[in-house]
Image (spheres, coloured by chain):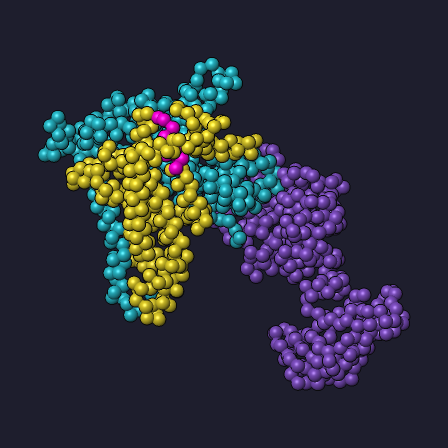
Chain colours: A purple, B yellow, C cyan
Amino acid sequence: MRLELRDLRKRFGDVAAVDGVSLDILDGEFFALLGPSGCGKTTLLRAIAGIVAPDGGQVVLGGEEITARPLHARNTAMVFQNYALFPHLTVADNVGFGLVMRGERKAAIRARVEEALALVRLPGLGARYPTQLSGGQQQRVALARALVVRPAVLLLDEPLSNLDARLRDEMRTEVREIQRQVGITTILVTHDLHEAFAMSDRLAVMNAGRVEQVGTPAEIYARPATRFVAEFTGDANHFDGRVTAVAEGVAVVSVAAGLTMRVAVGDARLAAGQPLSVMIRPERVRLGAGPGELPNGFPGVVEHATYLGALTNYRVRCGEARLLAQAQTLAAPAFRSGDHVLVEWGEHDCAVRA
Amino acid sequence: MLVALNVLMVVFMLAPLVLVVWMSFTPDEFFSLPLQAFSLRWYHEAFAYPGFVDAFVLSLVLALAAATVAVSLGFLAAYALVRFRFPGRAALDTFFVSPLLVPAVVLGIALLQFVNRLGLYNTFAGVLAAHVVVVVPYTVRVIATALRAVPEEVEWAAMNLGSRRGTMLRRITLPLARRGMIAAFLFAFILSFDEVTVTIFMTGPAYQTLPIRVYNYLTDQVDPTVAAVSTLLIALSAALVVVLDRIVGLENLGR
Amino acid sequence: MTAPSARSAAVAWLPLLFVLPLALVLVAWFVWPLLGSFAGSVHPFTPAGIDRSRWTLENYGKLGDPYYVGVLGRTLRVSALISLITAVLAYPVAHFIAGRRGRTQALLLLVYVAPWLVNVAVKAFGWMLLLGPKGLVNRALMTTGAIDAPLPLVFNETGIVIGLVHGHFMFVLLPLWAALAGLDPNLAAAAGNLGARPWQVFRRIVFPLTLPALLAGIIINFCMSMAAFATPALLGGARARMISYVAYDVNLVDLNWPLGAAMAVALLVVVVALVWVSQRLTASGRRRVVFEGAR
């Protein structure tokens, strides 16, 4: 079902945890809310579930407004960060809890619980108690418990953050697979960039209670709308400068550090003298020895090379500008500290912000 | 509904105390609740009544002595339990707290027969020892909690720098655990002052603490003097509770 | 972690030095008298005094007399009633307090803890003023015409129940409140999210998880009621004597110390057994509530 959030607001004391958030999440979509701790993403999720009541705004599910509906009357199911499994109930009773609340019959409950446990690949563990399970198993039980009631929206509150790294990677793919199989609209809250990118169809980057940008992972990574989004989603080279000339979708920008670069701006209407910010991802900055082929090329000196195994990070100085470049290492790092290099990138390798 | 019930419960908890205090200000001869005139005559009566004043002094001295002894013994015991590791530590911990397990009636009976055989019936020493026994589980617990908050490293540092354990205790540990010690003392004081059951079994009419005198007064006759005395007792408890809360916070006393 | 070395020899007897004073006091004035009671309870009581040359179990046998059994029965009945009422009242109060923040919560806890620090005789006096035939409650009811004659609210079992529910309430409230406050709030949120209405959340989640704490508290409360002396003596009057008062009579009026000792021993055994049961309950309860996630 489609979920719309219209201008949601929530304050706690003096702090605006959610400050006017509007989102439109499509049916069957896997949508992530990404942001640092304290940005309001968990509060937003809880407002959707009905655990906290918003101070303003509306939550519309499948065309119906549910903002005023109590927690137990909404058709959402949440998987909590600490799983919140009922310690005094068996796994089967945990999973079947929502069905019991909905008044289903025992035989039907038993069948659907088995089905849900099979879906999360935990068949036969129904008689155990949560304390007897590993973290990964508990997480899957929590997921089964949420899915078995066939909710309109599945809400995941950092469900993988308590797992160790390897298990987390496994679970990412599994959870996404299950979601595709079931086709349920899902909202994931996470502070982990990779998790959001790997799992979601679209995501919203949040900061201090507001949404800074909504888009697909690729859009957000390549064309961050704000400096915060750019920096939160990876390393970036930032330049603030002024447009000196525009022609045929390419602007010439003179930046503070003394470089002049050519950037593709598409249809954007820009005037000479207008301020413009340019961002280039380190992996788009190419380092080479010899004559350049790309529109933007600057001589520079490698200040530092950091070997990271598959990749190597280079810090390069071009005149007064400092750039971060990243390249695959292959056999060994291509350059060392002190080497003279040509730094270059193409017109479409950067993103601009007015 | 929930709020209404809770309001009633708070009223329930405070009602008898409020009533006693209110009654103590009545100008009348008999029990009535003063609505217009308030008087301190029963307070004058209370202070004039030698029985009450003597009993107050006895209770005061007893409580001060019991608290001092209980805190001293309790500090040594708590220190050993918290800082040292030795076989039987857990058992000893349970032992020091075991008086809580024994009903006051049982202890009263046992001590009654015991002190009589020793010829210590109705003596200060006998009652003092009994109060210490009753009160010491609380002092041990409270002081142990306070000591646990003092990091052991601080003591090692002091001893490393050449201080002997006795000096170190006096100049480092005690000051750091001061709040807990004061809380334990006040706690012991209130509990000893209020102690009724064990004391009743162990003392006769000649040797009455203030609560016992109030108790006897209530069983024979009742006039508002007892209300004045009771109010003073409530005030004493209230004052000590406030001081305790200020120093330590009642929620932090650690069970 | 080991203490600084060089003192290994001294350290051996140092703990002993610290614990000995208290241990001696307790042995002398606590253990020894109790043992004395055990010993004293097995001698027969004769008109001439305690005959220490003979041993007998007749004192315990006397506890089976209809009089004592009757008093014990009343004590058990009243204590059970007190525990029941306390249990029913403790939940709404604990729930309410757990839902308040900071200063209000501390203040409320103070209200419930403070009566414990007020003298038992004073509290009983207050109840007499409230519940007596000319007390506040009766006078209020009669002035409004709700009743014609004063209700017998004190100097009987009712008085004892009210007085002991009041005096011992904190001992059930505090552990229950602690258990409620320690519950993972996500559990209630999860239950609600899955469709449980508030009363269902209570019945299926909160109650089962806090039940061990409640039971443990109730058992302690029961023991305290069984063994209470001053409150039942003052508020029960001659009509409702509990075993503690009978013990007083036997020891200080009849001066039948062997019988008195037997009563003390019997009461002690019952209380210790019940406390042991209560400890087992909290221990097992703790094992099951330990899972609260990584929070």
Residue located 18% across and 32% down the image = C258
| Residue B249: % across, % down | 45, 48
Comparing C288 with B243, the one in front is: B243
Q: Answer above or below: position of A41 versus A307.
A: above
Comparing A227 with C112, the one in front is: C112
The answer to which quarter of the image holds residue C121 is: top left
Q: Which stretch appears magenta?
A: B222-232
Q: Is residue A179 visible?
A: no
- Left or right: A308 in relation to B144: right
Residue located 68% across and 69% down the image = A235
Majority secondary structure of the magenta segment?
Answer: helix
Q: Is residue C33 magenta?
A: no
The answer to which quarter of the image holds residue C77 is: top left
| Residue B192: % across, % down | 32, 42
| Residue A2: % across, % down | 74, 46
Comparing C68 with C163, the one in front is: C163
Q: Number of labelled discs?
A: 0
- Left or right: B200 in relation to B180: left
Q: Which residue lies furthest to the right in this view?
A: A248
Q: Answer above or below: position of C255 versus C295.
A: above
Q: Is residue B229 magenta?
A: yes
| Residue A323: % across, % down | 71, 76
Q: Residue furthest left?
A: C53
Comparing C241 with A120, the one in front is: C241
Residue located 52% across and 43% down the image = C105
Q: Is residue C245 visible?
A: yes
Q: Which residue lies furthest to the top in this view?
A: C148
Image quadrant occupied by the N terminus of chain C: bottom left
